[in-house]
Image: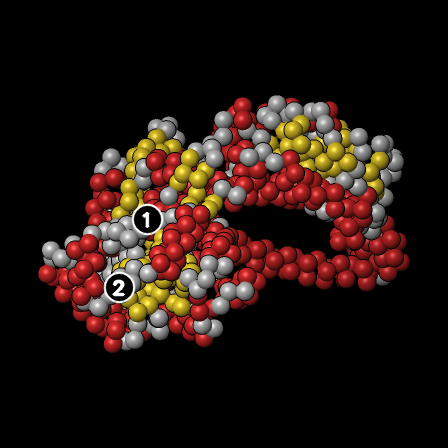
Amino acid sequence: MLNFTLWIALPAVAVYFGVCALVFVAMHLMSAEMNAIDSNRGKSAIAAAVESLVVGLAESTADEATWTEAYINTYIEPNPAWLDSVWGATARISDTYDTAILTDMSGNIIFGETSRGPVTGTLAELFSGVPQLLERLEAGIARAGDDATVSNLSRNARGAAALAGAVVHGNSGQASIPREQRRVLWLARQLDDIMLRDVATRFQLPLPRLVEVPKPDHDAMALTDAAGAAIATIDWPPRRPGDPAFAHTATIAVLVMLIIGVLIFVVLAAFRHSIKLRTASEERDWYNARYDGTTGLLSRFGLEEHIAQAIPRKRGELPVAVSQINVDGLQDIVGLYGREAANELLVALAERFETITDGQAVLARTGPTELSLARLGEDAGEKIRGFADRILAGAGEPVPVGNLKLKIGLSIGVVDAPTRRDNVGNLIRMAETAVARARETGGNHTVAYDPAIEDERRRRIELQADIRRGLEAGEFDLEYQPIIDFRTQAILGVEALMRWNRRAAGPMGPGEFIPAAEASGLIDDLGMFALRRAIEEIGPLGELKISVNVSPAQLRNPTLPQTVFATLDEWGVAAGRLQLEVTESFLVSHPDRAIRLIEQLRQSGIIIALDDFGTGYSSIGYLKQFRFDRVKLDRSLVAEIDSDPVQAALVESTMIYAFAMGLAVTAEGVERREEAALLSRLGCREFQGYLFARPLRLAQLERLLQGEQALRQAS
């Protein structure tokens, strides 16, 4: 028995007590570790919440600053009232920020508003760390241009706050703003106990508070501004979850050992599974960020990264060429055949382009309707232009998609320039500018990037701002060109023609300002001005017909008929006196909508005329497809018909077809008696052109009508 006690029992007891001691030591260490983990978790959660506030404010500042409307009201036409109505009003009532300040690059306040009232002076007088933030902003502008943004915590009179700044600039390709003219938008939000209470609720933490000096037994985290100076301290009581755990488990050591073993096993297994899932998610996110899910091609980000990585750091620059190819009409294919057919079309085009390039260029999908080619090296420009020519040459071939054979158009933009690793995005932006120009000029051709395109876009933005100002200043007016009955020489009606006599820069023709108004959405305002002014001025002039042009952009507005009806009612003008002139561009792009709109207007008695007949390749077909009341022959169709038998035959056949359809015919742009005589013999009765009358101001038109009336009475 002694040997048993000495050699088995005692060692067993010793081992037992030793294991118990080790268990208690382990439990003690574990409780201490639990306390530390919980403390670090609290610090991380609060740090993340503060960082989220700063980052979110920076994103809001960048969004507010990158805005064409802000660009116009800050630089082109400085408008303090607009600044207050947009940024000042938001600062007074919004939870996003409570301070909005506009400064120059030295921090001098140009406009400032807080939830407590306006502020003046300099930004550095209100917030700490401002010189360092201005230095960072200068450095950011040097790297990334006017898109640079800075943000940090700062101290103001109320305590700690988040502060973010960004250069005010447009979002439509404006040129970089000179430093002395540059304006910086600063947004701030106060860091307060309410935000910390939300953090405590979200992460189930003890309530943290902002204090000057933390309590000795509390956890704390210091906040610093951009200069590294302490601005505040966040303090919260530790929970120390390890202490009660140790107390509860000490009396049941054996059970605790088993439970701890099981828990460790479960925790490790769950943690391992979580790591595997997170790794798979990160790999998936990495892939999705760099590759397009539909075509499997590189995405825009992936293309930028690929080009940047291929440029040696030490070399600095490398010739790079990029061609962006827009698939014109892809959205129409989506509407007609569905998204799946459009995706299959993109895949088929990608395969076609890969065959053409034969691995000599990188292919990517850089937008919803855009594919891009890129190549590096001395021959990059020549190769990419050659690929673009071959792709464009094959654009007329139908693309098989399932049981369909789809014909598409391609607009291509090409740019070729030495590029640095940090400037790849700018190169792709140049290609986007070039392809946008290709689309604007009709598509199905290639446009090489030229800085003049950017200049023209900037001028267009300035012109749009000038149109808006001209409308407000009452600079627009109308002239009226009479429409004459050739047999009686009586004035049947007039066509309203828009005129803009800019007070600062002089007159500008409709051919220049109408496209800019359509691109900016101002065409609705201009169109309604012309309609209301024409009805107001011509309405009292007897039974004279009023002819007004309606742009395709206005026709896309579903409220147009109601607006026209309301205007006629307002001035008491019969619907039968109004003639709306439409062009075939809207009919081509939206035939079903055009049929419904024309019928709705005609049912009220309004006359619908097809304007500029003869300029489009398919106008004859529209006479049968759409229910018009009148056809207006374009100047290009009637000019020189007395000396061109082919042209005369074309006009005669067109008029026969129109008369057979029950349509009236008006000849526009008639300038010679010989043209008018031949048109009259062919059956045309109504004429409009310089041979009969030039566009007239209202007073001139009234005198002409009075003279006509006097002549009629005398006869």
CA neighbours of label 2 inside 10 A, class few (<14), some (14 to 19), many (20+): few
Q: Nearer the viewer, residue 600 or 62?
A: 600
Instruction: Pick the quarter of the image with the N terminus.
Output: bottom right
Residue 684 lies left or right of residue 316; in this view the side is left
Looking at the rendered structure, the kind of residue marked 2 is: Arg
Does residue 410 appear in this view?
no
Residue 492 lies left or right of residue 634; in this view the side is right
Q: Position of residue 592 (x, y in %)?
A: 39, 72
**Residue at numbered disc 2:** 487
Which quadrant holds residue 99? top right
Q: Residue drawn 43% across and 52% down?
A: 702
Q: Residue drawn 38% across and 56% down?
A: 710
Q: Position of residue 115 (x, y in %)?
A: 76, 40
Name the disc covering residue 694, or none. Answer: 1
Question: Does dot 1 land on a helix, a strand or a loop?
Answer: loop
Structure colour scheme = secondary structure
Residue 187 lies left or right of residue 256; in this view the side is left
Q: Residue furthest front?
A: 714
The mark lying in front, picked from 1 and 2, is 2
Looking at the rendered structure, the kind of residue marked 1 is: Arg
Q: Nearer the viewer, residue 617 or 112?
A: 617
